[in-house]
């Protein structure tokens, strides 16, 4: 069922409920007003009877006369009742002294049926007679009121279905009018495909719900456009990086018959390019996992001093062959909770870069300390440094400052991006400071695990 119809039904049901409540209210109020008028008339009538001066005289003759008149009243719906509520058929004179004085009571109204089974409204009030309390009952027929209320009810019942039908039709028209702009937004959104992500919905000037909806959809399309752009750039950059080693491998293979070149050199070159491709594929895989947050590497407590010592050891011989020294200074022990493999990759990438971009005779200093709830690892080198205009971009994918700067230029500009992704996934931060020509300092901050004390 369409939303339009559901809205119509909800509105019609709500309208019907209001209509029924309103009908009951009108009926009830009219009934009450009429009943109040009848009650006021009964009250006046009872007061007239009770104010008869003969009742005060207390002489048998006066009471007799009064009672005979009551018989007439009886026809006009007034009666005298004894303490048990029975209508008296004879004057109460003579029995007055013998009877126990009944308790007086407050006047009250009641709706009942009289001896002819006619619905009546009756006022019962105390009346003192010959030292005894009787009940004076004054009644009025409700025939007229019932007839009038029946008419009111019939009018309400006859007009309600028509009113409800008009209400439902109006509800349908309103639903159509309210949903028309939404239909328009839907139609225009449908027209925006992956190829046309530069298009936007027109945003109404008024910042009402529809304006907000159009704005939200536009921001969503904006984010999609950005993501699509990133994916396109990523694919283009990755293809470009893969194309170079593939071209080298291909040309080496095609020129295999060239007897002037040593076949061993040719195979070495092919193997080098294969290694480069393998490394690139690994890096792309790590990046994809980290960026999508799908990395489910087991979390454990990692002693950073141990991890750094192992990483430094692993790179030491390679560094020494390039006459670069690596030193590790642990100022305070630090334990973090995270994926050991990922963190090892972070420090490996930073150290490899430091060694790679530091010339012979240079040094790399790794320091571990902790401050303000963070473990801080800094990697300082005395290498070529990074030009100020590039500092803000070196953590971007595939960004390389200048491929000719390192002698072993096998990178693809993904190493620092991986560092950034892994550190961010560990709720940490990575930053760099650099002076061109005299090296740079990379600093990684990771939140300390619970058991580690602040060593600052
Ligand atoms: P790559 O794998 O190509 O080295 P990275 O993402 O690790 O890519 O580094 C990106 C760029 O940042 C590199 O091209 C390099 O120019 C620069 N860079 C990274 N680390 C250093 C460093 N320690 N000293 C100088 N430049 C660096």
Image: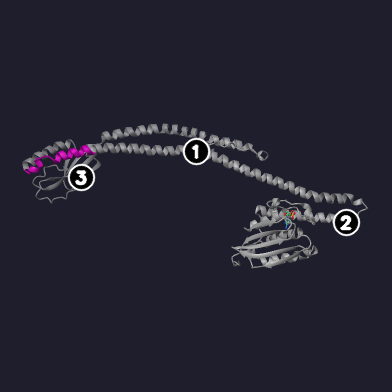
The residue to which callout 2 is attached is 265
Magenta segment: 39-59
Q: Nearer the viewer, mark 2 or mark 1?
A: 2
Locate the C terminus and report the quarter of the image it occupies. bottom right
* Foreground residue among 163 and 440: 440
Say which of marks 3 and 2 sits in front. Answer: 2
Quadrant location of the N terminus in the rendered image: top right
Of mark 3 and mark 2, the one earlier in the sequence is 3
Per the rendering, the mark at residue 107 is: 3
Of pointers 2 and 1, the one earlier in the residue sequence: 1
- Classified by dominant secondary structure, the portion drawn in magenta counts as helix
Q: Which residue is mark 1?
A: 7
Up-down relation of residue 114 to residue 97 (above or below)? above
Residue 412: % across, % down: 75, 53
Percent of width and height locating residue 209: 52, 40
Residues at marks 3 and 2, CA–CA distance in whole angstroms: 125 Å
Q: How many residues crowd around disc 1 within 10 Å: few (fewer than 14), some, or many (20 or more)? A: some
């Amino acid at each position: 069922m369409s939303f339009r119809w559901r809205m119509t039904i909800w509105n019609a049901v709500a309208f019907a409920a209001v209509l029924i409540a309103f009908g009951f209210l009108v009926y009830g109020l009219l009934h009450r007003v009429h009943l109040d008028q009848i009650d006021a008339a009964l009250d006046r009538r009872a007061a007239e009877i009770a104010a008869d001066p003969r009742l005060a005289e207390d002489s048998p003759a006066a009471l007799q006369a009064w009672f005979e008149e009551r018989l007439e009243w009886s026809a006009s719906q007034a009666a005298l009742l004894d303490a048990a509520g029975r209508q008296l058929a004879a004057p109460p004179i003579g029995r007055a002294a013998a009877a126990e004085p009944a308790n007086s009571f407050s006047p009250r109204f009641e709706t009942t049926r009289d001896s002819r089974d006619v619905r009546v409204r009756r006022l019962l009030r105390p009346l003192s007679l010959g030292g005894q309390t009787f009940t004076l009952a004054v009644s009025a027929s409700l025939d007229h009121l019932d007839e009038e209320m029946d008419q009111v009810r019939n009018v309400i019942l006859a007009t309600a279905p028509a009113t409800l039908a008009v209400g439902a039709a109006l509800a349908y028209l309103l639903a159509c009018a309210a949903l028309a702009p939404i239909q328009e937004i839907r139609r225009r959104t449908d027209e925006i495909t992956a190829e046309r992500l530069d298009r936007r919905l027109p945003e109404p000037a008024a910042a009402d719900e529809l304006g907000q909806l159009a704005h939200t959809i536009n921001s969503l399309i904006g984010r999609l456009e950005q993501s699509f752009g990133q994916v396109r750039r990523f694919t283009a950059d990755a293809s470009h990086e893969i194309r170079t080693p593939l071209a080298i491998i291909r040309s080496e293979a095609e020129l295999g018959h060239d007897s002037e070149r040593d076949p061993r050199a040719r195979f070495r070159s092919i193997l080098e390019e294969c290694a480069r491709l393998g490394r690139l594929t690994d890096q792309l895989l790590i990046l994809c996992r980290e960026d999508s947050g799908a990395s489910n590497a087991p979390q454990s407590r990692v002693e950073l001093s141990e991890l750094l010592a192992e990483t430094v050891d692993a790179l030491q011989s390679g560094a020494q062959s390039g006459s670069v020294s690596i030193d590790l200074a642990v100022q305070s022990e630090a334990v973090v909770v995270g994926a050991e493999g990922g963190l090892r990759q972070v420090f490996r990438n930073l150290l490899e870069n430091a060694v790679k971009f530091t010339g012979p005779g240079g040094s790399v200093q790794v320091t571990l300390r902790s401050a303000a709830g963070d473990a801080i690892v800094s990697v300082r080198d005395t290498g070529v440094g990074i030009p100020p205009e590039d500092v803000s971009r070196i953590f971007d994918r595939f960004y390389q400052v200048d491929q000719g700067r390192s002698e072993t230029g096998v990178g693809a500009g993904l190493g620092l991006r991986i560092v950034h992704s892994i550190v961010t996934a560990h709720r940490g931060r990575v930053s760099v400071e650099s002076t061109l020509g005299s090296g740079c300092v990379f600093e990684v901050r990771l939140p300390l695990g619970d058991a580690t004390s602040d060593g600052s």
